[in-house]
Image: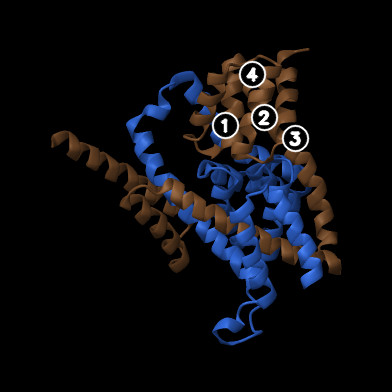
Amino acid sequence: MLVRLVLEFLGIGLFTYGGGLAMLVLLQDRAEELQWMGPAQFADMIAISQSTPGPIAINLATFVGVVQGGVAGAVAASIAVCVPGVLISLLVSRFLQTFAENPTVVHLLKGIRALVVGLIAMAVFQIAKISILVPEGQGGGLLGIFHPVSLVLLGVFVYGIARWDKHPLVYILLGGVLGVLAY
Amino acid sequence: MKMWLRLYMIFFKIGLVTIGGGYTMLPIIERELVVRHRLAGHDAVLDSFAMAQSIPGIVAVNTATLLGYRIGKTSKAIACFLGVITPSIIIISLIALAYGGASRIPWIEKALQGVRVAVLALLMVTVWRLLRRTVRDWFQAAVAGGAFLALLLFPVSPIAVIVGGGAASVCYYRWREGGSHAG
């Protein structure tokens, strides 16, 4: 159990370029296949990870770890997700000071940085399904698949974030308050 | 105080006061390491932060590892990396353990529904900003769009998309630079 968790997070850590958000699609993929958690719980986990101290990626790994294997799972998953990056950082520090200027690395990162945006967009698409669509089997028609209250809230939030750009925590707390009032 | 313990505590504090990770962490690292403790120079922090983004894994963790190595080789690097992830492990473990029961309380359920919409809005705005900042040429646009569509339309793993996109990126940019040298 714990071994499986460690192996999965070693893999996730190796293919994460950037941080927490770049990791989302990899996590979603594993969470779905290995039934770590449902999509609603997944969205809640992102909210918690963005609004509590620490790097988002570590918060996500800890959350999955706790759900799967208690505190031992949390420690194992969080350390495992760091190991590939830490090992490469140590190797680079020791042997490859010019790593970042290496042409292959530069070429790779140009594409990967753009690719990661596509990956994040996919994660966002999955979260849209759980946060603004009505559960399957209810509602009908093209517009009927959207939850009207959620759609209005989404518009308000997108406008607010683009306009004022406060810390994510502010919008997440506001979402909680509006949720209690509106649903 | 032993150096490794001192570094562990400094990075524990950095992990504790950063909410969200990534770029929010940079000014806090500078304040603690450069101004308060005088363990690293301004340039060392910026270099490490830039380098950390070229290495797979989590930017905050890689930055801590690279800075730790500069200050005192491998043992100090490990102290820094463990320090920066410890607050997350403690805080998220507590929250995740409480979450299971709390998410079934009706008003919290409603609040979480609102929170999920806020998370969606935050991520949508993030994707838009990343697209504008990252995508500079048609190849990058194709890679970002291609990654999204591949995951949406085919049962392909995100790791396969990252590996394929990375390889394509190295080939494309090498070919283009090769072409410009010849011409």
The Cα–Cα distance between marks 2 and 1, rounded to whole angstroms, is 16 Å
Above or below residue B4? Residue B170 is below
Question: Reading the chain from its start, which is encountered first: label 2 or label 1?
Answer: 2
The Cα–Cα distance between marks 1 and 4, rounded to whole angstroms, is 18 Å
Image quadrant in which you'd find residue B57 = top right
For mark 1, what is the residue? B62
User: Observer-nearest residue: B163 or A139?
Assistant: A139
Image quadrant in which you'd find residue B84 = top right
Task: Describe residue A40's horizontal placement relative to residue A103 as left or right.
Answer: right
Q: Colour of chain A?
A: blue
Q: Residues within 10 Å of mark 2 (few under 14, many from 20)?
A: some
The Cα–Cα distance between marks 3 and 1, rounded to whole angstroms, is 17 Å
Q: Secondary structure at mark 1?
A: helix
Do the residues bearing badges 4 and 3 touch, measured as CB atoms within 8 Å?
Answer: no
For mark 2, what is the residue? B28
Question: Reading the chain from its start, which is encountered first: label 4 or label 2?
Answer: 2
For mark 3, what is the residue? B16
User: Observer-nearest residue: A67 or B69?
Assistant: B69
* Callouts 4 and 2 on one subunit: yes
Q: Colour of chain B?
A: brown
Q: Secondary structure at mark 3?
A: helix
Decide if residue A38 is in sight here.
no
The numbered disc on residue B34 is 4
Numbered disc in front, either 2 or 1: 2
Numbered disc in front, either 4 or 3: 4
* Amino acid marked by disc 2: Ile
* Amino acid marked by disc 3: Leu
Task: Describe residue B122's horizontal placement relative to residue B10 as left or right.
Answer: left
Percent across and percent down for residue B137 are 33, 49
